[in-house]
Amino acid sequence: MIESGTVPEFAVVSGAQVHHVLAGQEKLLLELIESAYRLHGEGHTVNPPSYFLRFPDRPTSRIIALPASAGGDIAVDGMKWISSFPENIRTGLPRASAVLVLNDQVTGYPLACMESSIISATRTAASAALAADWLSRDRDRPRRIGFVGTGLIARYVHRYLAGSGWAFDEAGVFDLDPAHAGGFRGYLEGAGQGAVTVHPSAEDLIRASDLVVFATVAGEPHIHDPSWFDHAPLVLHVSLRDLSPEVILAATNVVDDVEHCLKANTSVHLAEQATGGRDFLDGTLHDVLTGRLSPAPDRPLVFSPFGLGVLDLAVGKHVFDQLRQAGELTTIADFFFELDRYGKR
């Protein structure tokens, strides 16, 4: 925080700087995300509903605002502004782009505008890897992983699993685009993963996997048969809209935040609409972290993380602090200019 009455500085943080700070820090980031979840579960955050900006002429695209405030050691306010334009993939651009604005909690002044697609992918992957760790503690640790969807988020989830000590005997890949599936297979093999199989269908992949990662751009459920999960896998439902209500209702369901997940036609939201209640939700990740929930090992276990703005703040503030301590913040002179009530004389 800055002192009250002090003229603030404003920094612009590039994606290259973000990448430099976060590279190779997977275990540290998992600890950071776990601390943020605990802070949120203890009521030391403010995390309003996300706001979706949609476009009638571009129905597949959206921009989402995630405002949040975090207390504790994070001690910052802010907002992530993240766009999802799936058509970008056709031209070779990533689907998502984002910025994160951090605000000082004493003055309210913005401290920084940060490139945030890396921050967003990092907090998503670290959240998934953290959940995989805690949710597998009462069951056999998965040895066969499968990825449905093979974009940047899938790559980050694999990176954070591997970076936090996971190793797999087998890996499976499925994507509607064979070229993307082949490219991700090459990435996994280059990362040292042996026995990588490109599966012909999602069903084939799911049945062959103990840990399934959904990281697609699906806008509505495309997985409808609960019997595909009869072997009780752990499912990281990162993309939130892949599973039908029938699949959700046949599983143990853990979310990151109940109110956030039950909106925007996520799979769990559709299940709520279908049943008229929330009894199918077994608890939150915070319940697992604190021992209030120990999911049964003999049922499919689905983790559906809507993604909380406080997680972006936790990662963004860490990057900001590291750059500031190293003297590497790029500040904009005179960004705040009208600071005199009666004007400059």
Image (spheres, rainbow, N blue to C red):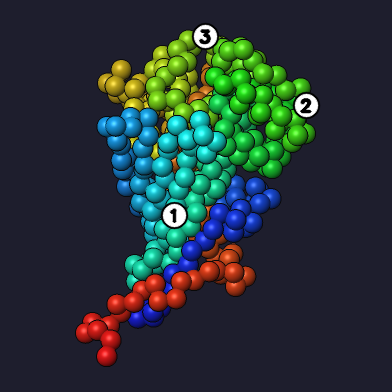
Q: Position of residue 77 (x, y in %)?
A: 39, 59
Q: Position of residue 41 (x, y in %)?
A: 43, 46
**Cα gap from disc 1 to disc 3, whole angstroms:** 41 Å
Query: Image quadrant for the C terminus?
Result: bottom left
Which residue in the structure is indicated by mark 2? Answer: 194
The dot on residue 100 is: 1
Identify residue type, mark 1: Leu
In this view of the protein, which residue sits in the foreground, 114 or 47?
Answer: 114
Q: Would residue 335 be visible to someone looking at this image?
A: yes
User: Is 75 displayed left or right of 276 in the figure?
Assistant: right
Q: Above or below — where is 10 with respect to 68?
A: below
Which residue in the structure is indicated by mark 3? Answer: 227
For marks 1 and 3, the one nearer the N-term is 1
Q: In what element is the residue under mark 2? A: loop
In this view of the protein, which residue sits in the foreground, 181 or 259?
Answer: 181
Q: Residue at x 64, y 15 (%)?
A: 199
Q: Quadrant of residue 107?
A: bottom left
For marks 3 and 2, the one nearer the N-term is 2
Q: Residues within 10 Å of mark 3 (few under 14, many from 20)?
A: few
Q: Position of residue 101 (x, y in %)?
A: 41, 58
Q: In what element is the residue under mark 3? A: helix
Task: In the displayed orientation, state which residue is furthest to the front.
Answer: 91
**Cα gap from disc 2 to disc 1, whole angstroms:** 37 Å
Q: Would residue 238 be visible to someone looking at this image?
A: no
